[in-house]
């Protein structure tokens, strides 16, 4: 058996038992990273990739520092650890030699994680106004508005079905069936604004949908049977940005995840605490939420600080002549 065939068989054996226990996206990600590791081992003429020796994994880290971010390196180490766990093997990533390699990489490639720009309320309003009065425009406006209201990821928007909607005049809501952090698939309830409910009613009426996936692909103004893929949702957001007149540089800063980021930032600026934002977006960790909103929060705090300083400065200037007159009056009174 060739070495390539052996690698393929190893990958199959690792992921054969994972079907149904992990999402397809998670498995594909692990497979992609493990394929890179196995290919690197092949170029180094390392015959045994699984189990891998700690020294080999440490060399893998050192070799990737120059060309990859530390987040990418750590993700690939997670894939290596996952493969060993699935085979009931000791993970080489726990060895000190690997940990030291990661610390070296972190010091050499120290950088803040780059976050996409948030699609805030103001940006959403421009995008919704730019969506044309066509079937595609109705769908795109509904996707953007629902994504902002629910703080959904692109994959979560693609998984929503008609049956998950509960549209009422007194308040509309929607069931998000499964999220990234919801391994058990319990789902979460998200509430919709009257504006978003109106966009949804318009899209459903125009598409004549009664069941199945809520957001679907269109071909020659005909609605497909299956749901949109996550990459299509990202393209829809970027197309709406072009229609709204945003520059290429600005469009490059926005992704399908920006609706989630922007809504969280708007909630922080509006005065909601981290717990309320976590509940709205289905987050389990405060660290992730705080990283999402730090840019908006810090900017808002600095703007408030500058306004207060300007106000207090104006008061100080205005009160200076009066204080001077009081001092003169006291001085005259003492002399008399």
Image (cartoon, rainbow, N blue to C red):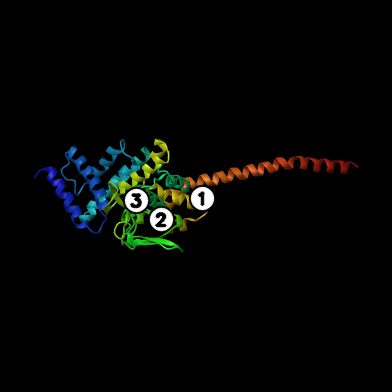
Q: Looking at the picture, tell me which residue is in the foreground, 210 or 296.
A: 210
Confirm whether residue 111 shows in the render.
no
- The mark closer to the camera, 3 or 1, is 3
Q: Is residue 162 above or below residue 73?
A: below
Tell me which label, 3 or 1, sits earlier in the chain.
3
Q: Rounded to the nearest whole Å, what is the CA distance between mark 3 and mark 2? A: 11 Å
Q: Looking at the picture, tell me which residue is in the foreground, 328 or 199.
A: 199
Q: Rounded to the nearest whole Å, what is the CA distance between mark 1 and mark 2? A: 17 Å
Verify CB contact (< 8 Å) between mark 3 and mark 2.
no
Q: Position of residue 141 (x, y in %)?
A: 39, 49
Q: Looking at the picture, tell me which residue is in the foreground, 242 or 284.
A: 242
Check disc 3 and report its element: helix, strand or loop.
helix
> Mark 2 sits on what residue?
150
**Residue density around tag 3, few if under 14, some if 14–19, many if 20 or more, within 10 Å:** many
Confirm whether residue 31 shows in the render.
yes
> Mark 3 sits on what residue?
154
Residue 23 relative to residue 45: left or right: right
Residue 81 relative to residue 5: left or right: right
Q: Position of residue 201 (x, y in %)?
A: 39, 57
- The mark closer to the camera, 1 or 2, is 2
> Mark 1 sits on what residue?
269
Residue at 19% x, 53% y: name it.
Answer: 14
Q: Position of residue 247 (x, y in %)?
A: 41, 36
Check disc 2 and report its element: helix, strand or loop.
helix
Q: Quadrant of residue 72?
A: top left
Tell me which label, 1 or 2, sits earlier in the chain.
2
């Amino acid at each position: 058996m060739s070495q390539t065939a052996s690698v393929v068989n190893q990958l199959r054996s690792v992921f054969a038992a994972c079907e149904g226990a992990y999402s397809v996206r998670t498995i594909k990600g692990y497979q992609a990273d493990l394929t890179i590791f196995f290919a690197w081992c092949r170029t180094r003429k390392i015959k045994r990739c699984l189990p891998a020796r700690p020294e080999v994994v440490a060399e893998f880290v050192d070799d990737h520092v120059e060309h990859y971010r530390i987040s990418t390196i750590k993700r690939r180490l997670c894939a290596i650890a996952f493969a060993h766990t699935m085979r009931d093997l000791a993970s080489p990533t726990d060895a000190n030699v690997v940990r030291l390699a990661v610390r070296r990489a972190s010091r050499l490639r120290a950088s803040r994680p780059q976050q996409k720009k948030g699609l805030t309320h103001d940006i959403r309003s421009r995008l919704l106004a730019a969506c044309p009065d066509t079937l595609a425009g109705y769908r795109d406006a509904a996707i953007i508005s629902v994504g902002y209201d629910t703080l959904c990821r692109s994959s979560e928007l693609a998984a929503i079905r008609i049956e998950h909607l509960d549209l009422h005049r007194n308040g509309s809501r929607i069931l998000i069936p499964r999220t990234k952090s919801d391994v058990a698939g319990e789902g979460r309830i998200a509430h919709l604004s009257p504006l978003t409910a109106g966009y949804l009613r318009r899209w459903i009426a125009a598409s004549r949908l009664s069941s199945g996936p809520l957001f679907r692909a269109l071909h020659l103004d005909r609605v497909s049977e299956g749901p949109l893929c996550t990459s299509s949702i990202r393209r829809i957001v970027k197309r709406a940005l072009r229609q709204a007149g945003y520059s290429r540089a600005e469009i490059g800063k926005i992704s399908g995840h920006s609706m989630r980021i922007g809504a969280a930032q708007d909630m922080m600026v509006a005065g909601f605490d981290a717990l309320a934002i976590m509940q709205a977006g289905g987050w389990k960790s405060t660290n992730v939420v705080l990283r999402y909103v730090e840019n908006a929060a810090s900017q808002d705090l600095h703007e408030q600080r500058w306004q207060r300083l300007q106000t207090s400065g104006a008061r100080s200037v205005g009160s200076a002549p009066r204080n001077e007159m009081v001092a003169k009056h006291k001085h005259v009174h003492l002399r008399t």
